[in-house]
Amino acid sequence: MNAGNDHDITDDEEVSLRVALIRCSALSEEAIAKISHAARVLDVSFSEAALSTGFVSQEDVDYARQSYQSPTARTAKARPSAELLLSRNPFDVRSEKVLALRTELLLRHDSDSRANMVALVSPSAGEGRSRLCAELALSFAQLGHPTLLVDADFRNPRQHLLFEAENENGLSRAISKRESPHLQPIENMPNMWLLTSGPKPLNPLELLSDSHFERMVRDWRNNYEFVVIDTSPVNPYSDGLAVATLVGRVLVVSRANHTRFRQQREMLRKLAVTRSQILGAVINYF
């Protein structure tokens, strides 16, 4: 990249600028497609292509750059823990199965819609849902496209532990304070960001039913190519149902020799009310 003010910008910064530019300029799906096509044809960055096609001005680019370079964005990077084998050993048996699942989800995605967004749900705790969420997000990010992992489990959040990340400024705070979410970049994963759960709130279901959270989901759908959302167990809590209603696509997770059939049946009954599309079911063996 050697044109305009974008010279010497790193790949990591360009991805952040692309996401910020789409958000700040409210670019439509059609505009994003035309800019992306121009970037490929001209062999320039997304921001340079947006300028050359006239969809944004230099002032728009400068404002977007300031947005992603704000103190909130310049946080220390989160780091995948040793539990997330996919980040260290992609040839491990479990890693291979996660990559196979990624392929299936890609094939089930409607290319006419925007982000490939999915919420993972399970009947109860201890079924491996959070770990699979993290692994799926990592696998999507490895494709080189903007990926967001969201921890919407306000009951027993784990993503900040899986990524050794701070959890003071997470989703619960963003909703309750009606602020922009605090996204954390992932070490060695320039295309991935993490939104932790934040402090445990007193009113989890109310927060996830709030219009501000709905706007966040709509924003993620427009600004990322892959979004993976962790949720609370469906049977004891209704939080996951609120998320499933907004997202519209869910992946059901259970654990062999742990999840009972009646628990699975009860969860599916509750999910039917949300009218969300069930993409498939995963049985964990560990």
Image (cartoon, rainbow, N blue to C red):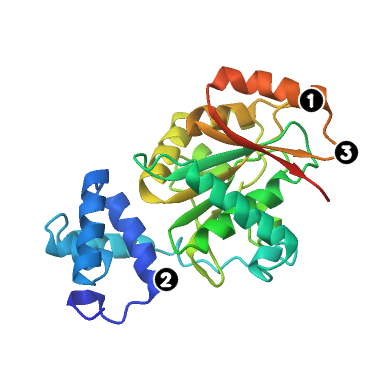
* Disc number lying in front (3 or 2): 3
Task: Give the residue type that dot 1 points to.
Answer: Gln
Marked residue nearer the N-terminal end (3 or 2): 2
The N terminus lies in quadrant: bottom left
Marked residue nearer the N-terminal end (1 or 3): 3
* Disc number lying in front (2 or 1): 1
Q: Residue at 67% x, 41% y: name it.
A: 200
Q: Secondary structure at mark 2?
A: helix
Q: Residue at 58% x, 17% y: name it.
A: 273
Compared with 124, 194 (above or below) is below
Residue 24 at what x, y percent from top left? Answer: 28, 51
Compared with 137, 61 (above or below) is below
Q: Residues within 10 Å of mark 1 (few under 14, many from 20)?
A: some
Q: Which residue is mark 3?
A: 257
Q: Which residue is mark 2?
A: 12
Task: Give the residue type that dot 3 points to.
Answer: Asn
Residue 240 at what x, y percent from top left? Answer: 62, 31
Residue 69 in view of the camera: no
Marked residue nearer the N-terminal end (2 or 1): 2
Q: Residues within 10 Å of mark 2 (few under 14, many from 20)?
A: some
Q: Secondary structure at mark 3?
A: loop
